[in-house]
Amino acid sequence: PEPQVEIDTSVSVGIDPISNSFNAGHEHQGLQVMCRAINSLGESQSQIQLQVLNVPESVKVVGPSLIHGQQDYTFFCEVEGGYPEPELSWIIESRNNVLYKESKGSKSLTINPTEWEDNNILFVTCEAKNTVGVRQSHTQVEIGSEPTSVTIKGPIFVYQGTHEYICE
């Protein structure tokens, strides 16, 4: 006899009873999908665990917008979602010139301003990439420096009244 076939899942997903299909989203990662065939002679069943492939939902670079001096500064890459798990890359650019690229997959990047003294603005980018796609985030970083000297120009001995001084 012809079996009756049923599809079921570990949570309600709104299966279309005619086509036995549903729209899978990232929230269905790991969902158990079960199929059961029943007739008057018995039943058979099988199941699979769903693996939903998707690009990372969001990527964000967190770190300082101004760096200076001799100390190290650390930037962090915050990634949400993505299956398979995305691989991370860091890119440092200045005016469309790639100065540095690292693909070791670390969620953090530490830089020292002395390495980038020839540039006053850097763009620090984190790239999260998997087999489905790529998402990026970048932040603009200004490299500042302390004044090395200042000179005041103007008279030392003055009569009462207004006198002009210039700082250089």
Image (tube, rainbow, N blue to C red):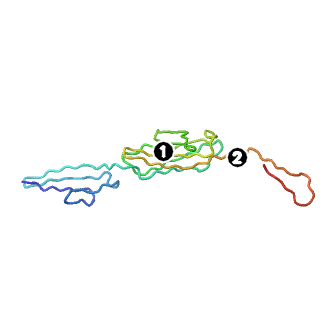
Question: Looking at the image, which is closer to me, 75 or 90?
Answer: 90
* Residue type of the residue flagged with mark 2: Glu
Q: Nearer the viewer, mark 1 or mark 2?
A: 2
The alpha-carbon separation of the residues under discs 1 and 2 comes to: 30 Å
Q: Position of residue 162 (x, y in %)?
A: 87, 60
How packed mark 2 is, by other alpha carbons closer than 10 Å (few <14, some 14-19, many 20 or more), is: few
Q: Secondary structure at mark 1?
A: loop
Front residue (pair 58, 49): 58
For the N terminus, the quadrant is: bottom left
The disc placed on residue 50 is none
Do labels 1 and 2 touch, CB within 8 Å?
A: no
Residue 51: percent from the left, percent from the top?
Answer: 31, 48
Q: Residue at x 12, y 54 (%)?
A: 38
* Residue furthest front in the image: 96
Horizontal relation, residue 37 to residue 90: left or right: left
Res. 146 mark: 2
Q: Tag 2's secondary structure?
A: loop
The residue type indicated by label 1 comes to Lys
Q: In the visual, does 3 lie left or right of 34?
A: left
Q: Pointer 1: residues within 10 angstroms few (<14), some, or many (20+)?
A: some
Front residue of this view, candidates 96 and 35:
96
Q: Quadrant of residue 69?
A: top right
Residue 164, percent from left and from top: 85, 56
What residue do we see at 44% from left, 52% from top? 58
Q: Quadrant of residue 130?
A: top left
- Earlier along the polypeptide chain: callout 1 or callout 2? 1
Residue for badge 1? 107
